[in-house]
Amino acid sequence: MVSADGSICIRNAHLFDPSQKIDSVGDVLIRDGLIGKIGGKLAHDGDQDSIIEADGKYLFPSFCDPHVHFRTPGQTEKEDIESGSRAALAGGFTCVIQMPNTNPAVDRPEIVKDLTRDEPLELRVMGAITVGTDTRVLTDLDSLFEAGAVAFTDDGQPVIEPVFMKAALRSGQENGIPVASHAENPTIGLSGIIRGGIIAESLDLPGWNAQRETSMIERDCDLAGSIGGHVHFCHVSVEQSLDVIRQAKADGVNITAEVTPHHLALTVDIVPDLTTYAKMNPPLGFEEDRLALIEGFRDGTIDCIATDHAPHTIEEKSKDLLKAPFGVIGLETSFGVCYTELIKNGNLPLSRLIDGMSIKPREIFHLERIGLFEGSRADLVLVDLDREWVVDPEEFESKARNSSFLNRNLFGKVLWTMYKGKIAWELND
Ligand SMILES: [Zn+2]
């Protein structure tokens, strides 16, 4: 597919990149893995081999997911770095950030180095704040940064001790990287299985109290406000949390936030139908939370989308709601769910979604900037926005099947994903 001079031309694509204010049909010329030229008609007829026909489909800067669990090392029966990478590419992502709650945890420089890779996509990792992410002993944060960690977090667990959070904020500030907060205050209410309310009562399950999240977000906003540093809030799920984030941002505190596709699309009402495939932490909220999250994403209180891709085996998810592990997968359905829910059925502009899936995650974690501009690494995704498809677990590249969206009809199908100028994943049909 490469011409004699090493160039590839993507012909007749709907070029769309809000960071470049591009929304028009044209061609993209790629040379040596980079975008060489972008604009009107660039394809020349002599080089048919080097032309990729886009047929007017949408071409976006590829997506970046700042929150995935690839289970390497230690739990590779659920997922591994290879299967997780394929799932990411199938979802249109060429960059993911892995969470450190593996076994062993990413609490040593050697593990950071092992999980930081440039093939088959840009794989990055956060370093643990406490040894084993078990909240007791601080890691050597600076050495994790030096090994390549792009942020610090104990995700999966909150950082209960303020003194550890302060240490992470100080090291993060010195090294210029964020601290990602899994905001959950264990001193408020029960840990809970699903959001507390009528559904939890009817299923006889311990309910999760929304204040667990909001009060920890308050604490971390206060810490970032008083000692500095950048806090990034993972998977925000509660309406009241948004008010806290909005206020802290208005006060000039350096914070950013993410939301998952499942919290944008689903509520606790779906739990009786989906059972353990709707069990995740934080749990699905009420309709008022969902609407507030959409509004928060629209107005920029929430900066970006993150899947919190959390694979488990079918056996583990076949247990009852009390015993099954928390978490759902999301990489291969993220764009379809968000596009269908926010744009097709909602009234958000497409530009906000591409900003939140492609541009903002890379900005927040100081990753290489990509986009539809000359000189950018050619990391691109071609999507058929009009194509309706059904989420079929047999088609997943992930080892896992624990999606909340199985058998759903979605719009917006990834046709291929290009990484460094090469098509790294292509839809078979
Ligand atoms: Zn988390």
Image (cartoon, helix red, strand yellow):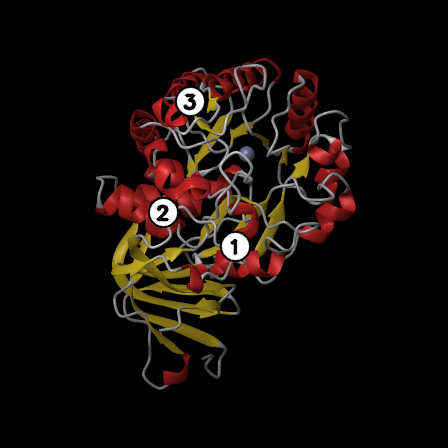
Residue drawn 33% across the image and 60% down it: 413
Q: Amino acid at mark 3?
A: Gly
Q: Amino acid at mark 1?
A: Ala
* Front label number (2 vs 3): 3
Looking at the image, can residue 21 be seen?
no
Looking at the rendered structure, the secondary structure element under dot 2 is helix
Cα gap from disc 2 to disc 1, whole angstroms: 26 Å
Cα gap from disc 1 to disc 3, whole angstroms: 28 Å
Pointer 3 residue:
196
Pointer 1 residue:
400
User: Which corner quadrant holds the C terminus?
Assistant: bottom left
Image quarter of residue 41: bottom left
N-terminal of the pair, mark 1 or mark 3, is 3
Image quarter of residue 297: top left
Q: Is residue 135 above or below residue 54?
A: above
Using the image as rendered, state which of residue 368 and residue 73 is in the foreground.
73
Using the image as rendered, state which of residue 4 and residue 233 is in the foreground.
233
Give x and y (percent) for residue 10: 36, 70
Residue drawn 49% across the image and 80% down it: 5
Pointer 2 residue:
354
Looking at the image, can residue 322 be seen?
yes
Residue extending furthest toward the bottom = 46
Residue drawn 56% across the image and 29% down it: 182
Disc 2, disc 1: CB below 8 Å?
A: no
Give x and y (percent) for residue 353: 34, 44
Answer with left or right where residue 163 lies relative to residue 183: right
User: Counting other residues with Cα less than 10 Å from the Cα at mark 3, is it few (<14), some (14-19), or many (20 or more)?
Assistant: many
Give x and y (percent) for residue 187: 58, 15
- Mark number for residue 212? none
Q: Is residue 303 above or below residue 317?
A: above
Q: Amino acid at mark 2?
A: Ile
